[in-house]
Image (cartoon, helix red, strand yellow):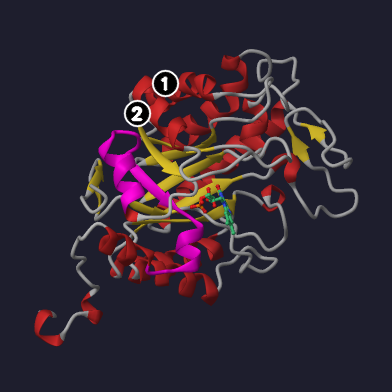
Amino acid sequence: MLFEPLSFGTLRLKNRIMMAPMATSFAQNDGLPQPEHLIHYASRALGQAGLIMLESTAISPSGRSVSHNLGLWNDAQKQGLRQINDTLHRLGSKTGIQLWHSGRKKENETTGETVLSASGLPFERRPRQAMNREQIANVVTEFKKAAHRAKEADFDVIEIHAAHGFLINEFLSPITNRREDEYGGGRRNRYRLLGEIVDAVKQVWTGPLFVRISAEEYHPEGNHVEDHVQYARWMKAQGVDLIHCSSGGILPEAPPVYPGYQVPYAERIRLAANIATAAVGLIETGKQAEEILRNGRADLIAIGRPLLRNPFWVAEAARDLQVELDAPRVYRPYWKQG
Ligand SMILES: Cc1cc2nc3c(=O)[nH]c(=O)nc-3n(C[C@H](O)[C@H](O)[C@H](O)COP(=O)(O)O)c2cc1C
């Protein structure tokens, strides 16, 4: 199944391998894509990843974690990303962009800068400000504007980053959301910001929409997979196509990890909320990926570090599964190039 196509509406992925979003730090202070981005992503497109999810990309300058994060808040950034997309598309991959606001986890704020967060809890002893309604409405609008630019930049998929303790996750999590207004309290209220962002994005975006979540927060008071089953049902009702099931990041402690440690979350959400899921995390071989797909535990397999180590990991997985992979045209023997 790993090498069978997967469709979302009119979008057809040639296989079920997605390059996981991974921050590169190649951008400069202006958030513009650099030649290094093109080389980095095009290598994985030559390597035949079906979907390349570009790294966490800030929706606004203040949504960055560090000054060299990629951004999509202006037209120059859009143009740069469009050029990357042109190349990746010519190489046969589909592309996605992960839209993101760092929230309280901002790393290198300038002195005196206001750092927005759900509840104003200090982060690593640095002050944070609870967002007021106007600031919340602004962030929703910035997600919508970035989604519109993503469309103009010719992306095939948008992924909203609602995982790893960043702004949207902060609102979802009872650990970091101590608000007393309609954005805090029970699940419905904690979900409100994500729900508003999904609705706003869908006003300008008709393509496949993914949302990345932290399905387990590794603390008794945090979100667990059953909370996310409920969120996923709401997302499905709003037209989200796939839940990308990661975990952790609200708390600094690293969870215990082992091969496929997050796969049970993708499986549970897929079955209970009846929505497509992507599995990610220490999936290292073609056979392991095939097991997940064949046993109905996920629809798409996201590969992170193995694709950093080896841009041609997809060929390795094909060998593992004894699948003959069509080489990109340029690499075929000349008599097969027609
Ligand atoms: C260098 C690096 C950068 C990452 N940046 C992001 C990111 O921008 N957005 C995100 O959601 N996850 C990010 N992640 C997490 C990966 O997407 C993935 O979930 C994680 O590496 C586990 O998958 P793996 O075992 O296949 O690497 C990053 C991981 C690495 C190693």
In the rendered structure, find residue 307 and report the number of the disc placed on it. none
Residue 238 is situated, as x and y percent measured from the top left of the image, at 41, 25
Q: Is residue 291 magenta?
A: yes
Q: Pointer 1: what residue? A: 233
Residue 282 is situated, as x and y percent measured from the top left of the image, at 49, 49
Instruction: Tell me which corner region of the image, top left, top right, bottom left or bottom right, holds residue 130.
Output: top right
Along the horizontal axis of the image, is 66 left or right of 328?
right
Which residue is found at the position 59% from the left and 16% from the top?
187
Placement of 274 over or under 180, stated as above or below: below
* Viewer-closest of 318 and 100: 318
Along the horizontal axis of the image, is 101 left or right of 21?
right
* Residue at disc 1, secondary structure: helix
Along the horizontal axis of the image, is 333 left or right of 103?
left
Which residue is found at the position 59% from the left and 35% from the top?
140
Which residue is found at the position 77% from the left and 27% from the top?
119
> Please, what is the three-letter code of the amino acid marked with disc 1?
Arg
Which residue is found at the position 35% from the left and 28% from the top?
275
Quarter occupied by the C terminus: bottom left
> Please, what is the three-letter code of the amino acid marked with disc 2?
Ile
* Residue at disc 2, secondary structure: loop
Label 1 vs 2, first from the N-terminus: 1
- Quote the CA–CA distance across marks 1 and 2: 8 Å
Ligand 1 closer than 8 Å to label 1 CB: no
Residue 289 is situated, as x and y percent measured from the top left of the image, at 34, 48
* Viewer-closest of 267 and 52: 267
Disc 2 crowd rating (10 Å Cα; few below 14, some 14-19, many 20+) is many
Q: Pointer 2: what residue? A: 275
- Magenta stretch: give its range: 287-312
Q: Are marks 1 and 2 in contact (CB under 8 Å)?
A: yes
Residue 44 is situated, as x and y percent measured from the top left of the image, at 40, 67
Q: Is residue 51 magenta?
A: no
Placement of 275 over or under 16, stated as above or below: above
